[in-house]
Image: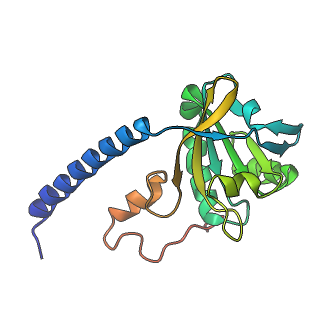
Amino acid sequence: MMKYQAAAIKLDDYRRQITDIRAKMRALKDEAEPQAVKDYEFATLAGPVKLSDLFAGKDDLIVIHNMGRSCPYCTLWADGFNGIYQHLADRAAFVVASPDPPEIQRDFAQGRGWRFPMVSLKDKGFAADMGYYEDGCMPGISVFRREGDGVVRVSNAGLGPFDDYCAAWHLFDLLPGGPGDWRPRFSYS
């Protein structure tokens, strides 16, 4: 077994390597040509809205692809996004999109105390075109930017355990044995 201090030094080296890789990823994202997308339509309690309507006066839009109320993993991520929503919304518009009807979204969001806006997918087109549909909606993130009279996608990322977008997994990873067999639930006793 390695001594604590020796392991800590090695872990710090790995973290520096990860930071270097992230810088390379950031540079590659900045070099990539944006992907033109159509102006998809979504359902809300107030009626239909277009993708271009979701920018809330900002130039950039973060859309979370969420599987809906039946997924405890997506709920865990959404709970985390709710905690930082005001910070995100200061820089970019932020919306969660799921296949649930608007009334179900409203009730579920109210029950969890979510403050961010939600839109309902009218069909699988948006999720599929963005790469987040495989026998049903899949979790992920798409980032859009206004460009001229249209909208382009500038980056995306999948969501899943140990991704960069859910702090819980990284905190569990600091525990002996990591998360073990822990799985998210809708409520805990």
Quadrant of the image occupied by residue 99:
bottom right
Is residue 98 something that shows in the picture?
no
31 sits left or right of 148 in the view = left
Image quadrant occupied by the N terminus: bottom left
Quarter the C terminus occupies: bottom right
| Side of 128 where 26 appears, left or right | left
* Residue drawn at x 31%, y 44% as measured from the top left: 24
**Residue 10 position in % (x across, y down):** 14, 59
Q: Residue at x 35, y 38 (%)?
A: 27
- In which quarter of the view is residue 50 placed? top right
Give how far across and how far down residue 119 sits, in percent: 77, 45
How many numbered callouts?
0
- The residue located at (18%, 53%) in the rendering is 12
88 and 176: which is toward the camera: 88
Q: Please say if 50 is above or below 188.
A: above
Write the residue at 53% across / 71% down.
183
Q: Is residue 4 visible?
A: yes
